[in-house]
Image (cartoon, grey):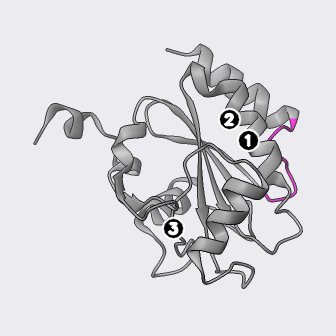
Amino acid sequence: MTQARAACPRLLNHKAARLQDEAVQDLCQYAGQVLLVVNTASYCGFTPQYEAMEKLYALYAGKGFQVLGFPSNDFAQEDNDTKKIAELCFNTYGVKFPMFTPVRVRGADAHPLYAELTKASGEPPRWNFHKYLVDRKGRVVASYPSRVGPLDDRVTARIDQLLAEK
């Protein structure tokens, strides 16, 4: 086992394919950073939150923070065509934060990351754009429902606090 792999928290010890090219990524690359993990969808009333997610990412990216977006059709509001999802994310909303190919976020066949997020928080996503805040040690420290936007003071204050902790 490599030293980097040994330092990877259990929550991130998984792989996911990037949306833009389906290249498989080791989520351990985000170890040591504060993360906002969000299940997304193209045809949801909350889809405009992509803009706020991108603003949040731009605000904090150089400080050890990442937004990780995971499209999901668990609520029947995502396209089946990954090229269309990518078009919406990257061209319509100008997303620069990491986006992954669609995954299941609920139930027995949830992606392992989402199974861990649900177990750690006690809350599965109840709808699209549910947000999990993860500290630098890979612990889920907060869970926000869809209606709490990424730039909500509750979210940004907690991110500021987590980034201040070393």
| Residue receiving disc 3 | 101
Q: CA distance from mark 1 to mark 2?
A: 5 Å
Which residue sits at x=81%, y=59%? 146
| Residue receiving disc 2 | 57
- Residue 3 in view in this figure: yes
For the residue carrying disc 1, how many other residues have a C-alpha within 10 Å: few (<14), some (14-19), or many (20+)?
some
| Residue receiving disc 1 | 54
Name the spot of residue 86 as percent of width and height, x first: 62, 64
Question: Is 80 above or below relative to 3?
Answer: below
Pick the quarter of the image with the N terminus.
top left
Q: From this viewpoint, which residue is outermost toward the left?
A: 1
Please tell me which of labels 1 and 3 falls first in the chain. Answer: 1
The disc labelled 2 sits on which kind of residue?
Tyr
Proximity of marks 1 and 3: CB atoms separated by less than 8 Å: no
Q: CA distance from mark 3 to mark 2?
A: 19 Å
The disc labelled 3 sits on which kind of residue?
Thr
Please tell me which of labels 3 and 2 falls first in the chain. Answer: 2
For the residue carrying disc 3, how many other residues have a C-alpha within 10 Å: few (<14), some (14-19), or many (20+)?
many
Span highlighted in magenta in the image: 145-152
Q: Is residue 67 left or right of residue 58?
A: left
Proximity of marks 1 and 2: CB atoms separated by less than 8 Å: yes
